[in-house]
Amino acid sequence: MSGGPGGPGGPSGGPGGGGRQQLQQLAETIQALDREQRALEADIKGLRNQQKAIDEAVEGIETLENGSVVQVPLGGGAYVRAEVQAIDEIVVDLGGDYAAEREQDGAIESLEAKRDRLDDRIAETEKEVAEIEEESSELEQRAQQAQQQMQQQMQQMQGMGGRMGEPGDDEGSEDDE
């Protein structure tokens, strides 16, 4: 007999804990999706910063010549001035803790390939963000519908409670004293 109204198989689920519990679960899921979306957006920002650094490196490689004076970062915010002795000897990070010496054109090609891979990662991450936004929007609509249903059920219950204490005629009312 578990299929009666208000029971586990009932049509309304009742205005009590079930609806509130469902709303709470939806709210928690929406919050988790929001956190995930913010993390992915931060990843995109980091990837774009890497692209910007690559663009600056490419521009520097294209404009530098032998004999150019540059500031070389030593780390910790310290720099030293140095003279470029051989522009065709550029060390490029290949990833995975590997680097390779490249000539000027080869270095630019390596950096542009790296930038293209970043473009792909950004596109994939933006797709994930769009999917999360869509899922979050659907869940927000479900939560809104569930909340409206709960409000309707509460109004119906209040309406039934008010009618139960009011007989059709005024006999038996509390005003008969």
Image: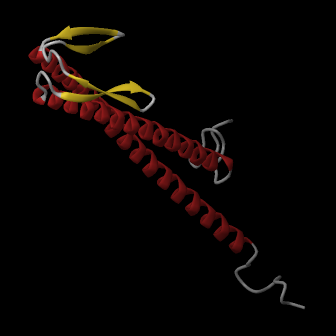
Q: Quadrant of the C terminus?
A: bottom right
Q: Is residue 41 above or below residue 105?
A: below
Q: Residue at x 34, y 33 (%)?
A: 128
Q: Is residue 54 above or below residue 37?
A: above
Determine the image quadrant of residue 79: top left
Q: Is residue 51 left or right of residue 103?
A: right
Q: Residue at x 81, y 83 (%)?
A: 173
* Outermost residue toward the right in this view: 177
Determine the image quadrant of residue 54: top left
Q: Is residue 137 left or right of residue 93?
A: right
Q: How is the image coloured?
A: secondary structure
Q: Quadrant of the N terminus?
A: top right
Please name whichever residue, 10 or 128, is drawn nearer the observer in this view of the structure: 128
Please name whichever residue, 93 or 66, is drawn nearer the observer in this view of the structure: 66
Q: Position of residue 23 (x, y in %)?
A: 57, 48
Q: Is residue 54 visible?
A: no
Please name whichever residue, 63 or 59, is drawn nearer the observer in this view of the structure: 63
Total labels: the figure holds 0
Please name whichever residue, 25 or 72, is drawn nearer the observer in this view of the structure: 72
Q: Residue at x 63, y 62 (%)?
A: 154
Q: Position of residue 5 (x, y in %)?
A: 63, 47
Q: Position of residue 98 (x, y in %)?
A: 32, 8
Q: Position of residue 123 (x, y in %)?
A: 25, 31
Q: Is residue 123 above or below residue 91?
A: below
Determine the image quadrant of residue 122: top left
Q: Is residue 121 visible?
A: yes
Q: Residue at x 57, y 62 (%)?
A: 151
Q: Is residue 53 left or right of residue 24?
A: left
